[in-house]
């Protein structure tokens, strides 16, 4: 008995391939819930209101911290680093190190703002999640928010490091005069 | 003597010019309102999606306290013209270190502690 298979046209193959790609994307994008123990599930469900209140307080505290850090970094860049480099150029004493640090400090400041925005969006999404009926999804989003918070912390550390480098370079310049 | 319009067999009743104007005015008002809603919605969506909402402390609940207001006159600004000597660089470093100290006063900003299981009270008691 001869088995005959239906012939697949080129457009049919393309359509099937497209469906397969879309299915793979859909599966990979799906939020796989973090596996919690029953006890943790219960704790999150029962304390949902308290959890959300804590997260809202943290959101406001983070915003205050960002303003303080952001305005200070802005002040350092515009009132200190940039005018110093300009003055050095006007006195025919440009410093390659200080110029490099100015560029790095400026990009690190922009990076801090970008990372803070991503972290804030994640925190807001976390606060909006119903932790009473879906504690595992809540915990998954909490893990993601923790990771983003860590990136913000790292960018702050980078800025502090660059500031320290700048002070060291200016001190060296002062001692060479 | 003019013949009244109703006596003329093929005459069509004239519509009042004020009804056209009223209808057009209502349509203009509704269109303007619709355009205002759409543009407001789009601008709020852009404000939210761009992330500016998270950097904006003028929104309700996030307003700065009175003591947080920095007086412009009290801020030091290093001049971009003048000599490069020990005196000017010492002044520069003294003011900059004050700012560095104010940053150091923040105890590990954005640390992992506030979002930890212990801080949120979701740690499993064993």
Image (spheres, coloured by chain):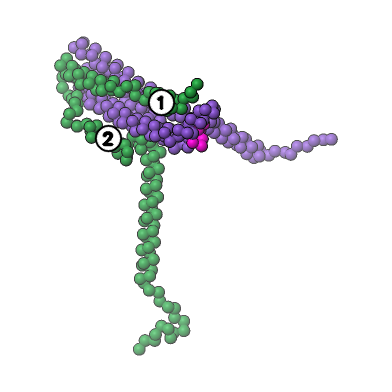
Chain colours: A purple, B green
Alpha carbon distance from label 1 to label 2 = 26 Å
Q: Mark 2 highlights which residue?
A: B64
Residue found 49% across the figure and 24% down from its top: B124
The answer for which chain carries disc 2 is B
**Number of numbered callouts drawn:** 2
Q: Mark 1 highlights which residue?
A: B119
Q: Which badge, 1 or 2, is on the more N-terminal residue?
A: 2
Secondary structure found at label 1:
helix
Q: Nearer the viewer, residue A63 or B80?
A: A63
Residue found 15% across the figure and 22% down from its top: B82
Q: Is residue B52 left or right of residue B96?
A: right
Q: Position of residue A57 (x, y in %)?
A: 36, 32
Q: Residue furthest front?
A: B126
Q: Which mark is residue A65?
A: none
Residue found 40% across the figure and 38% down from its top: B49
**Rendering quarter of residue A172:** top left
Q: Position of residue A170 (x, y in %)?
A: 24, 16
**Residue B122 magenta:** no
Q: Is residue A62 left or right of residue A141?
A: left
**Rendering quarter of residue B80:** top left
Quick one: label 1, few (<14), some, or many (20+) residues within 10 Å? few
Residue found 44% across the figure and 37% down from its top: A128
Q: Position of residue B14 (x, y in %)?
A: 40, 76
Q: Nearer the viewer, residue A9 or A154?
A: A154
């Amino acid at each position: 008995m001869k088995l005959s298979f239906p012939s697949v046209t080129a457009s049919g193959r393309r359509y099937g391939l497209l469906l397969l790609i879309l299915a793979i994307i859909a599966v990979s994008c799906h939020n796989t819930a973090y596996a919690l123990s029953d006890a943790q599930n219960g704790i999150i469900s029962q304390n949902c209101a308290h959890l959300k209140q804590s997260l809202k307080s943290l959101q406001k505290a983070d915003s205050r911290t960002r303003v303080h850090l952001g305005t200070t970094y802005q002040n350092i860049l515009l009132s200190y680093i940039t005018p110093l480099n300009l003055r050095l150029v006007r006195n025919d004493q440009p410093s390659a190190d200080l110029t490099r640090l100015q560029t790095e400090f400026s990009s690190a400041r922009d990076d801090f703002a970008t990372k803070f925005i991503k972290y804030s969006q994640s925190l807001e999404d976390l606060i909006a999640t119903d932790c009473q009926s879906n504690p595992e999804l809540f915990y998954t989003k909490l893990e993601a928010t923790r990771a983003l918070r860590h990136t913000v912390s790292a960018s702050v550390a980078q800025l502090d490091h660059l500031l320290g480098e700048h002070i060291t370079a200016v001190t060296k310049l002062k001692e060479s005069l | 003597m003019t013949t009244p319009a109703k006596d003329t067999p093929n005459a069509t009743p004239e519509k009042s010019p004020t009804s056209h104007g009223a209808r057009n005015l209502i349509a203009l008002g509704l269109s303007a309102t619709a355009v205002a809603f759409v543009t407001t919605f789009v601008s709020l969506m852009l404000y939210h999606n761009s992330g500016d909402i998270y950097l904006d402390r003028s929104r309700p609940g996030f307003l700065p306290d009175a003591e947080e207001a920095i007086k412009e006159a009290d801020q030091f600004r290093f001049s971009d013209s003048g000599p490069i000597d020990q005196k000017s660089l010492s002044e520069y470093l003294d003011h900059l270190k004050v700012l560095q100290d104010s940053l150091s006063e923040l105890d590990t900003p954005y640390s992992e502690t506030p979002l930890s299981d212990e801080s949120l009270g979701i740690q499993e008691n064993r």
